[in-house]
Amino acid sequence: MAENKRIDEPTGTETVGHEWDGIEELDTPLPRWWLWTFYITIVWALIYTILFPAWPMVERATAGVLGWSSHGELDAQLAAADAKLLPIREAIGRTPVENIPNDPELLRAAVAGGQSTFKVYCVQCHGSGAAGAKGYPNLNDDDWLWGGDINAIHYTIEHGIRNPDHDETRLSMMPAFGRDGILTPAQIDNVVSYVQLISGQGKASKATARGAQIYAENCVSCHGTEGKGDRTQGAPDLTDGIWLYGSDRDTLVATVTNSRQGVMPRWGNRLDPATVKMLATYVHSLGGGEAPVVTAAADGSGDVTP
């Protein structure tokens, strides 16, 4: 290959000996500016690896003499953001949750903060639009097991549902009528027929008549004589068109047979009180939130009861 090298007459540059179809490669030196740029990048790379985290080790990278890290920068930015929001968070923390909607500034801040919190902790079950899914309630409608006023929502978020390690958790325990041998499969089939009747999905029949008697003996204490439910027990209304697990016959039979024992985490031990209030305010604002429950006090004045 070396024997093929020669000086290119038009340019005066030596060739490298490569030739293809009459085209030869010249051994043109790199421009001086390019070489200096290349040398500078090498020097900069060496300086950078000394100043900043760079070389990978067994468990972590070298720290760098400046002690900078992207995690540290993020922590500083988050701390600055928290400091900026601290006054409004403290105001929300001091304000009873039922009074937050009365203050436009607090309400806007609480809804915005609650929406951000919802996206982090709640969308996995309730969905990004809070529409829920099978077994996870829709938070946009006006169907609430324990009440939809802001105090009731706040209590549910703070204490959760069926948390065995917490005495103040929401708790409703529907018996597994089939699994525990309380009702026979035929009796379950009849009571399901009755439930479909009162929910507008079926017609009266001998099965619904038998189911009405079974319902009166086993279900009235929680769901009521008309099947309207009982919020004090978290018993759902069986007459509306809203069903957590579905209203088809197979699903209803499965529910009566085995019961449903869904669990919602209690967020009072995971989130600070102000964040729980913001989350409750956001959920209440979605469209299904109800006005505070007002009962008459002994002196005749109105009293807000959670």
Image (cartoon, helix red, strand yellow):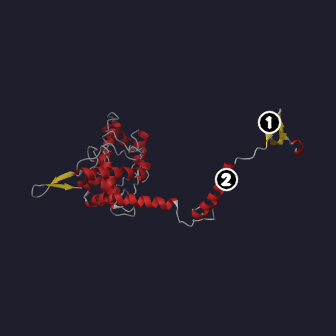
- Where is 51 relative to 251, above or below? below
Location of mark 1 (residue): 10
- Where is 61 relative to 240, above or below? below
**Viewer-proximal residue among 46 and 12:** 12
The amino acid type, in three-letter code, at marker 2 is Trp
Q: CA distance from mark 1 to mark 2?
A: 28 Å
Give the left or right position of residue 202, taking residue 299 as reference.
right
Badge 1: residue crowd in 10 Å (few <14, some 14–19, many ≥20): few
SS assignment at label 2: helix
Label drawn at residue 36: 2
User: Does residue 186 appear in the picture of this structure?
Assistant: no
Q: Residue at x 21, y 56 (%)?
A: 305
Q: x and y percent of residue 260 in the render? A: 41, 50
Give the left or right position of residue 43, taking residue 247 as reference.
right
Instruction: For marks 1 and 2, give the one nearer the viewer.
Output: 1
Q: Residue at x 65, y 52 (%)?
A: 37
User: Does residue 205 appear in the picture of this structure?
Assistant: yes
Q: x and y percent of residue 132 in the render? A: 40, 45
The amino acid type, in three-letter code, at marker 1 is Pro
